[in-house]
Amino acid sequence: MQSLFRLMHRWIWRDPYRRAQKLLCFAETEADGGRDLLRAAERTPDPLLRRLYLTHADDEQRHADLFRHRGVALLSALPVSSSLNFQANWFAPGERGLDDLRVEQEPDEALLAFLHLSEKAAAQRFALYRDVLADDPPTREIFAEVLHDETFHMRYTLSQLSRVSPERGMWLLWRARLGRLWKGYLRIAVALADVLGTFVLLVQYFLFLPPFAWLAKRAAAREKPGWSPISRKRNGALNREY
């Protein structure tokens, strides 16, 4: 199963245009996560967490620059006609960042729990992407560098969670894990609804619309050409508005 999973990711990252687009998407996610961490640093009363959040935000911005520059370089080397619509984001997602978490409304311990799980998932994904990009050393080196930082982020968030909330740390991790599962379910549900909606519209277009179009053409063919007087019996007298 693991070999099949790795082969799937190797196929996803093989196309250079899709590779470039995914790197640019990663850049946007990392930059957005960095902005959220800056807001978290502004609101936390803990001076140690403030320094760590600022360092983390700086790392996220650096990752965004790395991904963006590499994505632009790959796109500039491709012909203009290169295009690929299928990005396979569900099979090869990047880091979810804070995943639209309301930083201003979350205490430090809840934020640390969510960050730990997010960084752990990102580290696992980036390690896999690094392994399947043997034919692209520059991109592989970027993932290796980012993976080193993600490992540090994963460790500091767990240690700080144990310091800030030693009694509720495990419960907060479970709550954050359930929250990520719920958001993952919502993403899948939205994607499935989009697919089903498209399928229903296609069925309506190809199965129901042609008979109505045929009936309309048949009715039009029975109409006499030119102008014909309106039947008084059908429409009534013409001496009133209705």
Image (spheres, rainbow, N blue to C red):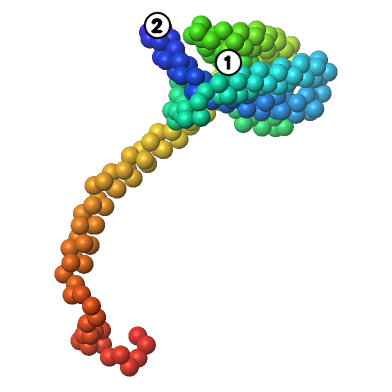
Q: Which residue is mark 1?
A: 122
Cα–Cα span, label 2 and label 1: 20 Å
Is disc 2 placed on a helix, strand or loop? helix
Q: Please report the residue visible at 71 percent of the width from the left and 21 percent of the height from the top.
A: 61
State left or right for residue 101 relative to residue 6: right
Give the quadrant of residue 2: top left
Give the quadrant of residue 140: top right
In the image, 74 versus 189, the foreground residue is: 74
Label 2 Cα crowd, 10 Å radius (few <14 / some 14-19 / many 20+): few
**Mark closer to the chain start, 2 or 1:** 2
Q: Please report the residue visible at 56 percent of the width from the left and 24 percent of the height from the top.
A: 75
Q: Please report the residue visible at 70 percent of the width from the left and 28 percent of the height from the top.
A: 36
> What x and y, as percent, mark residue 100?
62, 31
> What x and y, as percent, mark residue 209?
26, 52
State left or right for residue 3 relative to residue 235: right
> What x and y, as percent, mark residue 41?
78, 24
State left or right for residue 207 relative to residue 200: left
Above-or-below relation of 136 to 18: above
Residue sitting at the far front? 79
Specify the quadrant that holds the C terminus: bottom left
